[in-house]
Amino acid sequence: MGIVKVTRKRQITLPKEVCDKLGITPGDYVKVYVDEDNRVVVEKVLGVDELAGSLNPGYTLKDLAEELDRERKHGER
């Protein structure tokens, strides 16, 4: 996909093609580690917005805390 240079501060810039393929946008977090074959791996880390509802479909992130409090008070959960 491309060759990038490591800066004095050990920083790299991810090529646009890599970001596009992984769905990485400014402000996202990535996990960087070395695999068993000594390769550097970059993985996109899912944020709260992307995880919202994954364990309990149907609940939106907006006003979730308030909705959960209401349900707890009424014993609906």
Image (cartoon, rainbow, N blue to C red):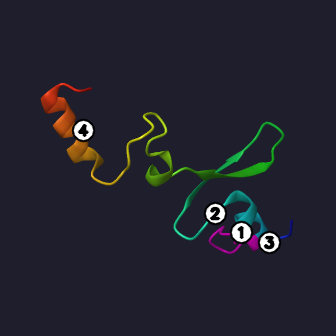
Density class for disc 4 (Cα within 10 Å; few <14, some 14-19, many ≥20) is some
> Which quarter of the image is occupied by the C terminus?
top left
Label 1, label 2: how many angstroms apart (C-alpha)? 9 Å
- Residue underneath mark 1: 14
- The one of 32 and 51 positioned closer to us in this rendering: 51
**Image vertical order of residue 56 relative to residue 6, above or below:** above
- Point out residue 68 in the picture as x, y percentages from the top left corner: 24, 38
Is label 2 or label 4 in front? Answer: 4
Is label 3 or label 2 in front? Answer: 2
- Point out residue 67 in the picture as x, y percentages from the top left corner: 24, 43
Query: Which element carries disc 3, helix, strand or loop?
Result: loop
**Image vertical order of residue 34 relative to residue 1, above or below:** above
- Residue underneath mark 4: 68
Q: Residue furthest left?
A: 73
> Which quarter of the image is occupied by the N terminus?
bottom right
Label 3, label 2: how many angstroms apart (C-alpha)? 17 Å
**Image vertical order of residue 69 relative to residue 29, above or below:** above
N-terminal-most mark, 2 or 4: 2
Marks 1/2 in contact by CB < 8 Å: the verdict is yes
Marks 4/1 in contact by CB < 8 Å: the verdict is no
Marks 1/3 in contact by CB < 8 Å: the verdict is yes
- Residue underneath mark 3: 4
